[in-house]
Image (cartoon, helix red, strand yellow):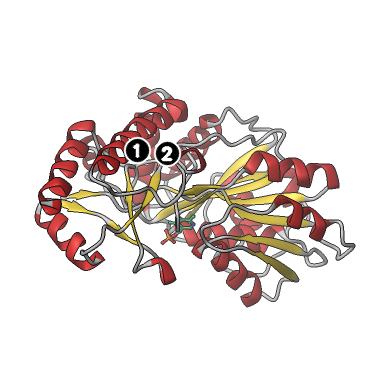
Amino acid sequence: MLLLNPGPVTLTDRVRQSLLQTDLCHRESEFFDLQEEARTRLVKLYDLDPSQWQAVLMTGSGTAAVESMIAALVPQDGKLLIVENGVYGERITQIASQYRIAHETVKHDWMDAPDLARIAACLDGERGFTHVAVIHHETTTGRLNDLAALGALCQQRGIRLLVDGVSSFAAEAIDFVNGGIDAVAATANKCVHGVPGASFVMVRRAALANAASRTFYLDLGRLAKLQDQRNTPFTPSVHAYYALVEALRELEDEGGWHARHARYAALAEQARAGLAALGIESAVPPEQSSVVLRAYRLPKGITYPQLHDALKARGFVIYAGQGGLSAELFRISTMGNIHPADIDRLLQGFAELAR
Ligand SMILES: *Cc1c(COP(=O)(O)O)cnc(C)c1O
């Protein structure tokens, strides 16, 4: 079965085999070597300066990393503006509410790009915002939000940016240095090609200085401090760390995030062109979409469950639209161990259904 959902991904044999390594106690030096290799490789992936940035690992899915980032990096007296144009933006609002973090939300229709003029007006309205949170790749629709433009807007106003990069990290450009960014939350089991169970926050060391401690298990400041000391507060998902390290080695061998971007871009274009030839339209213009996942309009005369089941019978798992979009859209992600021949077979499957 090939997974064309946005994570967990179809693994390479190399990463799958890495799960079978020796049992490891998380209080032994071998585990801390593994933890250190993952952290070092993550910092290196985007050529970050380790004196300014650190990777903080945690056990949990991508949402754990996002929650940890939001709960820590908006200081007690801070205020967050959340840019919402999909399910994951909405999730950050829910997290901020749950922790009683002072926040406001700029809501958009889920098919729309963030309205920079509206966001600028909010920030200029003397409402005390210190931070902005945004989803880089809003997986709801495949839209790649313009991080550079939003970062510039924040930078000009001395406001810090917190990014959910769960479905873009390792495959899309992220300007960590000039973008006003304090942190990017991500996960092992999407564009990095590891397994679920390990996630991480790439955080500016300076931002940790006035971090809040609102949560116990996901306390980013505490995790950061202990990991810098080759330590860990709790039992990590050791096997997921094995896979994360192997996936990061493989990513380096394949040419890093630029190469992964190029590979995904080619697969996404192959799928888009093939589906367009069958009359299946992109929901978001390709130039506004990520290379990681694309949303398409469901063809007439077929429901999502029918499409899903027919493709599953042919060995492919596609993904439904979320929330209100479930009756209109379906999604195809090309992250993971997916190759052009797989997309050819997928398109053949669509062609047979269209007959
Ligand atoms: C997948 C994803 C998440 C996290 O989802 P989990 O199910 O917790 O892994 C968060 N944000 C975005 C944009 C995502 O695509």
The residue labelled by disc 2 is 291
Q: Nearer the viewer, residue 20 or 302?
A: 302
Q: Name which residue type carries label 2.
A: Val
Left or right of residue 341, residue 330 in this image = right
Side of 191 where 44 appears, left or right: right
Q: Around disc 2, counting alpha carbons within 10 Å, would you say few (fewer than 14), some (14 to 19), or many (20 or more)?
A: many
SS under mark 2:
loop
Check whether the beta carbons of the residues at disc 2 and disc 1 lie within 8 A of each other. Answer: yes
Disc 1: which residue: 268
Residue at image coords 46%, 30%: 257
Vertical comparison of 320 with 159: above or below: below
Viewer-side residue, 108 vs 137:
108
Q: Quadrant of residue 34?
A: top left
The amino acid type, in three-letter code, at marker 1 is: Ala
Of 291 and 165, the residue lying toward us: 291
Q: Is residue 114 visible?
A: yes
Question: From mark 2 to mark 1, how far is it between C-alphas?
Answer: 6 Å
Q: Position of residue 93 (x, y in %)?
A: 62, 69
Q: Position of residue 125 (x, y in %)?
A: 87, 62
